[in-house]
Amino acid sequence: MAREQFGICAEPSLHGYYLLFNVVDDDNAYLRQALSRMPELFDNYADRFSEANLTGVIAIGSGYWDELHPEARPNQLTSFPSMDNEDRIAPSTSFDLYIEIRSDRADVNHIVSSKVCELLGSSVELIEQVRGFRFLDGRDLTGFVDGTENPKGFHRREVALVSNEQDETFAGGSYLHIQRYRHNMKLWQTIETKEQEDVIGRTKMDNIEHTADEIHPCAHIKRVNLKDDEGKSMEILRQSMPYGDMKVQGLFFVSYCNNPNHFKLMLEKMVHCDGEGHFDHLLQFTQAETGCAFFAPSLNFLKSLA
């Protein structure tokens, strides 16, 4: 049975380091070897710094997959679903490899990130690096709790991991979408708490969801909490983290799922208007600057790359 990468379903950490690479040469054989060795690198440092609860995820971009592994492809892996409507934009950006390193120690994340870059060597170019951090009791920088609707316990695996029935060849893997959002904090802070709560659809301090009578049709949770034709929730597993400094603040959004359609439908509901002109009003205060689709394969698959 395929073993998933443990970082996909891991519980939240205090610190995250997200590395995005593009391949710059044709030595795919070297990269296959390097990627096959990376889980062992993570395990070694997780043992060395056991108190840090280190986890890692390795994912391969939709545009690079066929070059790295032309023999087979996850059956639903497609490019990022870029969208735009008026001033609401979800751009698609090109990244070949994604490495996610999370733990409860920022220094350990830095050490492991350095080792990842050494292992990949000159075959790649580091395009973007984002350091995320846990903010207060798991809140976004807007002040609202993030990921309240995340699946809990074993259900995390059911939501995030591809089953044998879905794709036997790539069971234990996960479809991954990332977006780096940049918040307009100055604008956000100009509106009163009640208006902020209407934008999100929850109370700010107590994190209580608005009732059906109270919630605005443009509220964020109204737009992204979707159900299928059978009334079943269309869930994703978020592993997002706030990032930023005194000049730039935002959210590095990370979504894992056993299929890519849940994320795509959520993004459509956010960006595009419905028949009554409703869209996600949170997008008036934050802008996605990147977007890319990946597949995070099982540990068995990564080992086979060697």
Image (cartoon, rainbow, N blue to C red):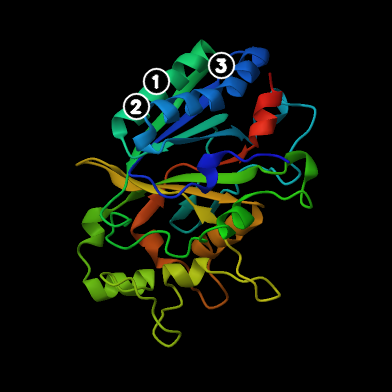
| Quadrant, the N terminus | top right
Q: Where is residue 77 in the image (x, y as percent from the top left)?
A: 69, 43
Q: Looking at the picture, how far across and down is residue 107, in whole percent?
A: 29, 29
Q: What residue type is labelled 1?
A: Ser
Q: Residue 110 carries which label?
A: 2
The answer to whether any part of residue 148 appears in the image is yes
Question: Mark 1 and mark 3 in contact (Cβ < 8 Å)?
Answer: no
Image vertical order of residue 2 relative to residue 215, above or below: above
**Mark 3 to mark 1: distance in Å?**
19 Å
Name the secondary structure under disc 3. Answer: loop
Q: Are marks 2 and 1 in contact (CB under 8 Å)?
A: yes
Q: Which residue is drawn at 43% across and 56% down?
A: 87
The quarter holding residue 29 reads top right
Q: What's the amino acid at mark 2?
A: His
Mark yes or no: residue 264 visible: no
For image coordinates 70% across by 74% down, the residue present is 229
The residue mark sitting in front, 3 or 1, is 1
**Alpha carbons under labels 2 and 3: distance apart:** 23 Å
Question: Residue 145 lies in what quarter of the image?
Answer: bottom left
Residue under numbered circle 3? 24
Q: Which of marks 2 and 3 is nearer the N terminus?
A: 3
Provide residue 89's location: percent of width, then percent of height.
47, 52
* Quarter location, residue 294: top right
Return the residue found at the far bottom.
213
Q: Nearer the viewer, residue 148 or 123?
A: 148
Vertically, is 260 above or below 234?
above
Q: Mark 1 points at which residue?
A: 114
The secondary element bearing badge 1 is classed as: helix
- The span from disc 2 to disc 1 (Cα, nearest Å) is 6 Å
